[in-house]
Image: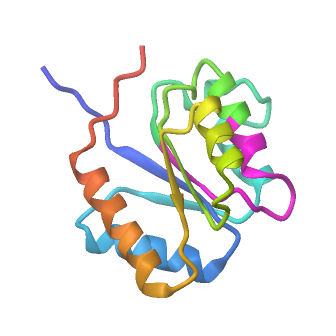
Amino acid sequence: MNNARPVTIVMVEDDEGHARLIEKNIRRAGVANEILGFTNGTDALDFLLGPDGTGLTNQGRQLLVLLDLNLPDMTGIDILEKVKANEHTRRSPVVVLTTTDDQREIQRCYDLGANVYITKPVDYDGFANAIKQLGLFFSVMQIPEAE
């Protein structure tokens, strides 16, 4: 029996224009899941790991994290490390969406457990297209059950 719970999309993106574009294209791809937006790492980590930092608050929840690396208060790498190091959130897929296309940075994200790394093209059409692909990815993706 498949008792798949709906996936909550956690978007950590400080650029309001990008956030709106990401949400619009996810919706356009037919993904109706709840999207929670955070504009800084502190608030995002409070949600993901709870005020106590244990991650228990999200035990059993299905989360998918869309993560910008360039945030006002910390790097997305800091968030990625904490999410992947926590037993309750480490299975949550993390999609890095960033303007950085530095190979070392990309490799570091994958080494830390990022599932997908998307470089945000500077031009609107390229970005919209990358997000459309992401929407298709969401529509076919099954997130593993938390144990």
Of the pair 75 and 26, the residue shown nearer to us: 75
The magenta segment is: 64-80
Q: Is residue 70 magenta?
A: yes
Q: Quadrant of the C terminus?
A: top left
Give coordinates of residue 95: x percent, y percent: 51, 49
The mark total stands at: 0
Residue lying at 21% horizontally and 47% vertically, measured from the top left? 140
For the point 34% across and 56% down, the residue is 33
Which residue is pictured at 32% across the width and 70% down the height? Answer: 27
Q: At which x and y percent is residue 93?
A: 47, 38
Q: Is residue 10 visible?
A: yes
Relative vertical location of residue 54 with respect to residue 78 in this rendering, above or below = above
- Residue 58: which quarter of the image? top right
The answer to which image quadrant residue 1 occupies is top left
Q: Is residue 67 above or below residue 126?
A: above
Residue 49 image offset from top left, x and y in percent: 69, 34
Q: Residue at x 62, y 47 (%)?
A: 106
Residue 70 pos. (x, y %): 75, 62
